[in-house]
Image (spheres, grey):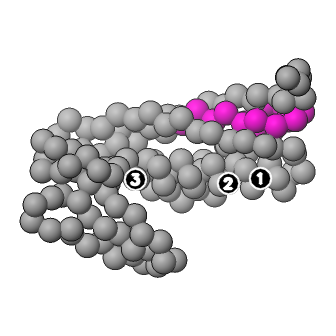
Amino acid sequence: MECTVQWAGPDTMTFWTTTGSGHTLAMDGAPEAGGHNRAPRPMEMMLAGAGGCSSFDVVLILQRGRHDVTGCTVKITSERATTEPKVFTKINMHFTVTGRNIPLRVVERAVKLSYDKYCSATAMLGKTAELSWSAEVIDESTVPAE
């Protein structure tokens, strides 16, 4: 796996990233750090990557278990150290899985498997941060049709 990160130039703290799979994305700094707030911060991208990695696992585990999953959202909150390097010290992920007749225990098992076995992003972040998670299920089979 590889990527190239290129600075956009002397009037900004924007960086363009091209991934090994051929995708391009931007990262930018806060205005007080010389950025223009035009893209996510690099540390936000790390949280987003961890959320994407773990959500990928959860959805795949549920699908492989033949569960009728129709949505998965993860809300991530974090705390960082106050001194340099300002690593993450706490990260919480709250998963909301939507589907039909999916027991909460099954979703919790999928999240636990992601954290304990599959998600390399949370495994890395867990070296400096206290990781926690929670989950809920929205059962579409009990929601009346409009």
Q: Residues under labels 1 and 3: Cα distance?
A: 24 Å
> In which image quadrant can residue 134 be found?
top right
Q: Position of residue 75 (x, y in %)?
A: 53, 35
Q: Earlier in the sequence, mark 1 or mark 3?
A: 3
Q: Which residue is tagged 2?
A: 57
Q: Residue at x 18, y 58 (%)?
A: 13
> In the displayed image of the protein, which residue is found farthest to the left?
10
Start and end of the magenta stretch? Answer: 93-108
Tag 1 residue: 61
Q: Nearer the viewer, residue 50 or 114?
A: 50
Circle 2: element type: helix
- Report helix, strand or loop for mark 3: helix
* Residue 71 spot, x, y in % from top left: 72, 42
Q: Is residue 13 visible?
A: yes
In space, the residues marked 1 and 2 are separated at their CA atoms by 6 Å
Direction from residue 146 to residue 26 in the image, left or right: left
Residue linked to disc 3 = 45
Q: Nearer the viewer, residue 87 or 76?
A: 76
Of labels 2 and 3, the one closer to you:
3
Residue at 20% from the left image edge and 49% from the top image edge = 36
Picture coordinates of residue 64 (x, y %)?
84, 56
Is label 1 in a helix, a strand or a loop? helix
Q: How many residues crowd around disc 3 within 10 Å: few (fewer than 14), some, or many (20 or more)?
A: some
Amino acid type at mark 1: Ile
Residue 97 magenta-drawn? yes
Pick out the residue farthest to the front.
146
**Residue drawn at (85%, 23%), measured in percent from left and top?**
146
